[in-house]
Amino acid sequence: MKNTALITGASSGIGKELARIHAAKGRDLILVARRKELLEDLKEELISKSNVAVQVIQKDLSVVGSSQELYDEVTQNGWQVDYLFNNAGFGGKGAFLDRDLEKDVEMVRLNVMALLKLTHLFGKDMKARGKGKILQTASTAGFLPGPFQNTYFATKAFVVSHTQGLAHELKGTGVSITALCPGPVATEFAQVAGFGGSKMFDGAASAYKTALKAYSAMEKGKVICISEIQFALLIRVLMPLLPKSWTAAIIAKMQQS
């Protein structure tokens, strides 16, 4: 396998589109997700259209120990990961104290702990080789308080901060790291998180266009990629001028619309 990308959450949404973009460049893939049938369908598509090597690994990365299991399986098979796309994650609507605590703990295990462990494990190998690229799927939520989706926003704040700090540490190593920070995207996320029918996802960006911007930013070595210009203006220009309490109130109203 050559120029190989390992993509978590590859069975749908942004992860699936990243796989298509990577394969279209003639680069090989390791696809990881819980739903093996969807991964196998994507594998057949990518091999047929792009004639690349594709491996499929069924794994629930919210399970304790699964990140190490994934790393061990990849390395024992002799597959070198040149691109790591930490894309798996989910959200959940509702007031924090009213939500099932275990569901939020599971969210932290997937959105934060799996990402942290895979970045460390594969990142060390990349650094030793002096070459590699890491793309983390974060969110514009990572820059904001998130009432009524509090744990999700907090996990993405971790991803943004961790990416910015690690990017500095990786200077001169040949390894780069990028955080994709989209606004609402047309994927399964809204339905899974309990936002089906919410006005917040009206006009959501396409998963393909979002993935394309992310891939381009990663190849250029950008640290932060806010994929929609209106959200870049919101985060970088408008929000810093507002009191935090106002920002939280605006986000709360959006979450409940």
Image: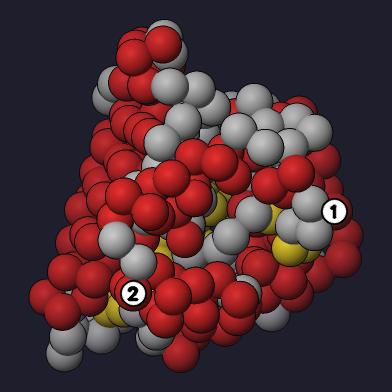
Residue at image position (85%, 53%) is 45
Residue found at x 43% / y 45%: 249
Instruction: Please give the name of the residue rendered at 25% of the width and 85% of the height, measured from the top-left corner.
Output: 174
Vertical comparison of 25 with 122: above or below: below
Residue, disc 1: 45
Whole-number angstrom distance, CA of label 2 to CA of label 1: 47 Å
Q: Quadrant of the N terminus?
A: bottom right
Question: Which residue is denoted by mark 2 in the rendering?
Answer: 241
Of 250 and 107, nearer the camera is 250
The outermost residue toward the left is: 169
Q: Is 192 above or below relative to 216? A: above
What label sits on residue 221 in the rendered view?
A: none
Side (left or right) of 59 relative to 18: left
Secondary structure, mark 1, is helix
Question: Compared with residue 82, is residue 252 higher up or lower down, i.e. above or below?
Answer: above
Residue 155 falls in which quadrant of the image?
top left
Q: Write down the quadrant of residue 253 in the picture.
A: top right
Q: Position of residue 165 (x, y in %)?
A: 16, 69
Image coordinates for residue 236, horizontal then vertical, percent = 40, 78
SS label for mark 2: helix
- Residue 61 in sight here: no
For the C terminus, give its image quadrant.
top right
Q: Amino acid at mark 2?
A: Leu
Question: Dot 2: within a 10 Å radius of its alpha carbon, few (fewer than 14), some, or many (20 or more) residues?
Answer: few
- For the question of whether residue 179 can be seen, the reply is yes
Place of residue 69 in the rendered image (x, y in percent of width and height, measured from the top left): 33, 31
Of circles 2 and 1, the one toward us is 2
Q: Kindly identify the amino acid type of the residue bearing the numbered disc 1.
A: Glu
